[in-house]
Amino acid sequence: MAFPPGISGVLSINLSALRRNYRAMAALAPGATIAGVVKANGYGLGAEAVALALSREGCRQFFVAHLDEAIALKTCLPPDATIFVLNGLQPGSEGAAAAGGIVPVINSVGQLARWAQVATASGRILPAALQIDTGMARLGLAPDDLDGLELPPQVDIGLVLSHLASADEPGNGQSEAQLAVFERVTARFAGIPVSLANSAGALRHARFHKTVIRAGIALYGMAPSERVVGLDIAVIQTRAVPAGTAIGYGGSFVAPQAMRLATLAAGYADGLPRALSNCGAVFFEGERLPIVGRVSMDSVMVDIGRLGPGALVEGSLVQLIGPDQSLEAVALAANTIPYEILTRLGSRYHRVLL
Ligand SMILES: *Cc1c(COP(=O)(O)O)cnc(C)c1O
């Protein structure tokens, strides 16, 4: 594939794989509807491209974090798509949410009252989702808030949801405890769709599937799903240095012997965690090339001693994420999670949609 000159790297986003991951999730949970979670610019991949790809698979429910994200997406999705705003209904945003046809996830009794007011004032029945905090202490009404709460008839609650705090930890019983609370509080919402599972919840057990699964990371290629993202970074200089050479900011790595190095055109401003300093690696033709010295803002050095002289030249591409090194492996090396790697992917790469 020919790329434009001077690019810092190639970020490839395999939308076909994303669509297969959506289908796989649907097959795993045949009784449930699969909603796409496309917050944070579609986990860094591009919200519009991702949401459109999912809509081609029949996805009609989308979750974002903020009203702005919802309004931006609304125009590019089919008119029958529903966009939920997970972070709730912020004071002053009610009019824009109502006018934009956005469905707020109501997270407090106060938000419910304000949404009901807007509905009354406009003479409409407004749609909403209702979030219950079943044990994460992040967002949503406490189960006690529901006791004696009268649901305003001008608010049409089309979904009741909660979020699991520890679904990705197999031995952790918190999910089962949350499920019990969720089933108790949703008993009063007979006939209304309910949603508890994110990706890990859906993979954990069918008990968590409920009516709607809110799938994020499993669509974006975290194992066991098919890989969606590839990232190759351009070499911008190579050099040979003698033993004793201090490499990078602070001289945190000193060459123990003569070395050959390549400088790559991406740094922490492009989402390469600074925590990869002196511990991460890239790959070239199957060879592991360790990062030496600190990750800079726009560049990073790697040890290319295992490659033959001339194997890498200015403009060569080396792999950070791909067949030789998974997203999970990069996250692990940086002591973080794949979500953080994806959502911080920089905007300076040449993006290729497959
Ligand atoms: C981000 C988020 C999801 C998606 O989680 P994944 O682990 O990426 O599947 C689902 N529900 C809520 C409330 C979220 O905040």
Image (tube, rainbow, N blue to C red):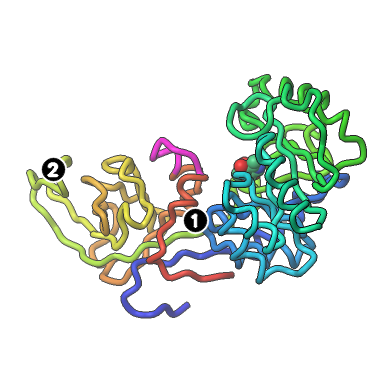
CB under 8 Å between callouts 1 and 2? no
- Residue type marked 2: Gly
> Can you tell which of label 1 and label 2 is closer to the viewer?
2
Residue 182: percent from left, percent from top: 77, 27
Q: Nearer the viewer, residue 149 or 309?
A: 149
- Residue type marked 1: Gly
Q: Nearer the N terminus, badge 1 or badge 2?
A: 2
The disc at residue 23 is none
Confirm whether the magenta stretch covers residue 163: no
Q: Which residue is mark 1?
A: 322
Q: Which residue is at a point 87% across and 35% down the rendered structure image?
A: 189
Identify whether 105 is placed above or below 206.
Answer: below
- Asked whether residue 268 appears in the rendered view, the answer is yes
Q: Which residue is at a point 73% across and 24% down the rendered structure image?
A: 143
The disc at residue 250 is 2
- Distance CA(mark 1)–CA(mark 2): 30 Å
| Quadrant in which residue 335 is drawn | top left
Q: Is residue 111 left or right of residue 302?
A: right
Identify whether 206 is placed above or below 45.
Answer: above
Q: Nearer the viewer, residue 10 or 131?
A: 131
Residue 278: percent from left, percent from top: 26, 41
Element at badge 1?
loop
Element at badge 2?
helix
| Quadrant in which residue 232 is drawn | bottom left
Highlighted magenta segment, given as a residue range: 331-338
